[in-house]
Each structure stands twice: as structure tokens, then as C-alpha cells.
Image (cartoon, grey):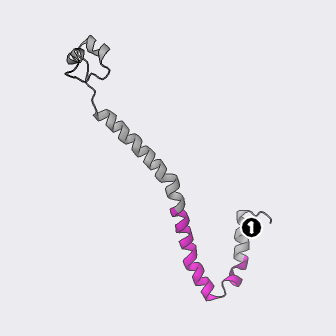
């Protein structure tokens, strides 16, 4: 099998076009099948490439929005900053009650 350039492939296809499309049934099959093939190929490749990227970017945007909208509470005293990492007040610990 020899390798052909794109222009050689087109020349080969056009040289055989009248011979291969003399039969109307074959021509009608090609008129329907070729666009269906292209649509199928595009529908197969597009989601593999672009939907993964869209999902990744969408997840990153949602995470950024979530971090922006969740406002952490500020510690009001030095004891709170040392004893509780998130400064979430709790009734069970006297040092956390100071937060």
C-alpha cells in the first residue's frame, strides 16, 4: 500500500467518480450515507474533547463561587485563633466560646 497526499487522494476520487456513480442507487446511498457519517463522526469526537473541558471548567467556576460565597468567621480573640482552627463556636469548650 502506498501513501498518498491529500491532493492525490482527491485526484483519485474524482478520476473514478463517473464510473462509481453510474448506478443511481449507489449515488443515492452515497448522498445519504456520507452526511450521516460526518455527523456521526463529529458527534463522537466533539463530546470526548469539549464536554470534558466544559465540565472541568464548570467545576472550577463552581468551586471558586462556593469559596467566595462561604465567608469564614473571623476570630475575635488571640485565644480563639490558637485553640480553634475554624473559629466555629461551641458550647462544649470554654475557649471556643470566646470566638
Residue 17 shown in magenta: yes
Task: Point out the stretch of residues depicted in magenta.
Answer: 15-43
Q: Nearer the viewer, residue 73 or 4?
A: 73
| Tag 1 secondary structure | helix
Q: Give the residue drawn at x 20%, y 18%.
A: 97
- Direction from residue 71 to residue 27 in the image, left or right: right
Identified at 49% across, 52% down, the residue is 50
Query: Callout 1: few (<14), some (14-19), or many (20+) C-alpha neighbours within 10 Å?
Result: few
Q: Quadrant of the C terminus?
A: top left
Q: Residue furthest top?
A: 78
Residue 17 on image: x %, y %: 69, 79
Residue extending farthest right: 1
Left or right: residue 94 versus residue 84 is left
Residue 8 percent location from the top left of the image: 74, 67
The picture quadrant where one finds residue 3 is: bottom right
Tell me where residue 95 sits by quadrant.
Answer: top left
Instruction: Give the image quarter of residue 12.
Output: bottom right
In the rendered image, residue 40, in percent from the top left (x then y), is placed at: 53, 67
Q: Is residue 80 above or below residue 46?
A: above
Q: Residue at x 53, y 72 (%)?
A: 36
Q: Position of residue 73 (x, y in %)?
A: 25, 24
Q: As drawn, is 73 to the left or to the right of 20?
A: left
Query: Which residue carries the number 1 mark?
Result: 8
Q: Nearer the viewer, residue 94 or 61?
A: 94
Amino acid at each position: 500500500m502506498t501513501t498518498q497526499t491529500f491532493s492525490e487522494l482527491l485526484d483519485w476520487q474524482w478520476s473514478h467518480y463517473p464510473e462509481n456513480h453510474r448506478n443511481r442507487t449507489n449515488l443515492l446511498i452515497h448522498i445519504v450515507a456520507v452526511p450521516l457519517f460526518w455527523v456521526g463522526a463529529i458527534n463522537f469526537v466533539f463530546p470526548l474533547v469539549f464536554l470534558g473541558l466544559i465540565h472541568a471548567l464548570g467545576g472550577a467556576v463552581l468551586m471558586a463561587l462556593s469559596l467566595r460565597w462561604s465567608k469564614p468567621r473571623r476570630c475575635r480573640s488571640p485565644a480563639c485563633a490558637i485553640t480553634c482552627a475554624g473559629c466555629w463556636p461551641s458550647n462544649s469548650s470554654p475557649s471556643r466560646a470566646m470566638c
